Amino acid sequence: QVQLVESGGGLVQAGGSLRLSCAASGISFSINNMGWYRQTPGKQRDLVAHITTGGSTYYANSVKGRFTISRDNAKNTVYLQMNSVKPEDTAVYYCRSIPITTSPGAKNAWGQGTQVTVSS
């Protein structure tokens, strides 16, 4: 059974920091690219950051220089370090695994989401 479980969300003041974690099970973590997405009510889910199996990263312009995505293949976990947060970062943050092969352990899956609220 594939599971992606996010944690670390909560309430933080503008300018503060937060670290999100996403623990994966039921997939071969090292052969999946991983991504963090976010969504606010009534809007589409947008990509925030992405990390490949080789460690290459991509960031949305709105978070570049403030957020850092990383992964620990030994722990089957991907992280999103959020620094200098702004009220507009308020959203539900979702973790996603993105398969890069057709191997059985490569899965397209989503976590259940974790709420991040930034107060001004």
Image (cartoon, rainbow, N blue to C red):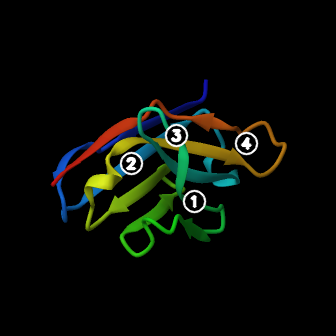
**Amino acid of disc 3:** Ala
Q: 26 or 15, which lies in front?
A: 15
Disc 4 residue type (three-letter) = Ala
Residue holding disc 3: 24
- Ranked by sequence position, the earlier of labels 1 and 3 is 3
Pointer 4 residue: 106
Foreground: disc 1 or disc 3: 1
Q: Residues within 10 Å of mark 1 (few under 14, many from 20)?
A: many
Near-viewer residue (80 or 91):
91
Which numbered mark, 1 or 2, is in the foreground of this view? 1
Q: Please name the residue that numbered disc 1 is placed on.
A: 50
What secondary structure is marked by label 3? strand
Three-letter code for the amino acid on which mark 2 is drawn: Ser
Residue 13 location in percent, x, y?
A: 15, 55
Secondary structure beneath dot 4 equals: loop
**Residue at image point 69% right, 38% down:** 108
Q: Residues within 10 Å of mark 2 (few under 14, many from 20)?
A: many
Mark 2–mark 3 Cα distance, whole angstroms, equals: 10 Å
Circle on res. 113: none
Dot 4 surroundings within 10 Å: few (below 14), some, or many (20 or more)?
many
Q: Give the percent coordinates (x, y) of residue 1.
A: 61, 24
SS at badge 2: strand
Q: Which residue is mark 2?
A: 21
The reply to whether the C-beta atoms of the residues labelled 4 and 1 are less than 8 Å apart is no
From mark 1 to mark 2, how far is it between C-alphas?
A: 14 Å
Badge 3, how many Cα within 10 Å: few under 14, some, many 20+? many
**Residue at (28% x, 66% y) in the render:** 83
**Disc on the earlier residue, 1 or 2:** 2
Q: Earlier in the sequence, mark 4 or mark 2?
A: 2
Up/down of 104 relative to 68, above or below: above
Q: Earlier in the sequence, mark 4 or mark 1?
A: 1
- Left or right of 71? Residue 9 is left
